[in-house]
Amino acid sequence: MSLGNEHVAVQVNGPVMSCVLNRPDALNAFSDQMIIGLQQALREAKENEDIKTVVLSGAGRAFSAGGDVKNMGDATAQHIYDHVGILNELILQIKELPKPVIAVVHGYAAGAGFNLALACDQILAGEESKFVLSFAQVGLVADGGGHYFLSRILGPYRAKELLFRAEPVPVETAVEWGLVNRVFPLDKLEEEAMNYAVALSKGPGRAMAMMKRLVDEADHADLASILEQERVTQTMMVSTDDHKEGVQAFKEKRKPVFAGK
């Protein structure tokens, strides 16, 4: 399967798939071609057992400016409807992929670019990064799941503030609010992100896939439902090779070597 296209560069290095948004002259504003390229890459990541972790980043000066504002005035209602439709499919693919997806943000993550990062399982950011929901500046509502993600992370009042005022959030505030996991100097960001991704790829793959699903479902499930899902899932996990390896490694006082089985 051919991976990547003109607007997204895809490379697989061992257990890590790197997807780089590649429209630097447009600050990696979304195009249909970019979204479709990411969809194809994520399908490969799902099917390829050797790929354990996916990293999303941006080329040039920013992670992503989100929607392509320069071309918005020429877009028809039908094109917007179709474009947001394939964006929705991408967001759902990220959430449903049974492997960790890491957003690596530098410069700006704006509009749907911000929401793309929020759809990921972890966000690593450079020290100068800023996050902004810029939709109100052009008279639009958020797309890419922004209303969903922000209301759950920040609560409705702060989420509405970000949506209404469209003011940039510096990375220090993003960390304080729980939007970002780790911050690194810009010149170390790529290296540290790869180290982070490789470390996750060495984890117990099946257990991590279930952790991802359970945490995401906890957003809208009641406690009794999650407790029962934990009960059923734990019963499945005790028969896995990874669990047996983890127990054996604990007894032998060494680090476990998980195979994702």
Image (spheres, helix red, strand yellow):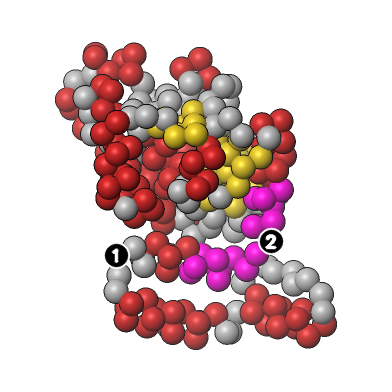
- As drawn, 139 above or below 85: above
Q: Is residue 32 visible to us here?
A: no
Q: Nearer the viewer, residue 149 or 31?
A: 149
Crowding at label 1, few (<14), some or many (≥20) Cα neighbours within 10 Å? few
In space, the residues marked 2 and 1 are separated at their CA atoms by: 30 Å
Q: Is residue 199 magenta?
A: yes
Q: Nearer the viewer, residue 47 or 162?
A: 162
Which region is colored magenta?
195-211
Determine which quarter of the picture holds residue 165.
top left
The image quadrant where one finds the N terminus is top right
The residue singled out by tag 1 in the image is: 220
Q: Is residue 255 visible to us here?
A: yes
User: Can you tell which mark lies on residue 202?
Assistant: 2
- Which residue is at 32% across, 81% downward? 224
- Which residue is at 46% across, 55% downward? 97
Q: Position of residue 61 (x, y in %)?
A: 56, 22
Task: Tell me the SS state at disc 1.
Answer: loop
Residue flagged by tag 1: what amino acid is it? His
- As drawn, 156 above or below 3: below
Determine which quarter of the picture holds residue 257.
bottom right
User: Can you tell which mark lies on residue 159?
Assistant: none
Task: Tell me the SS state at disc 2.
Answer: loop
Q: Position of residue 121 (x, y in %)?
A: 49, 53
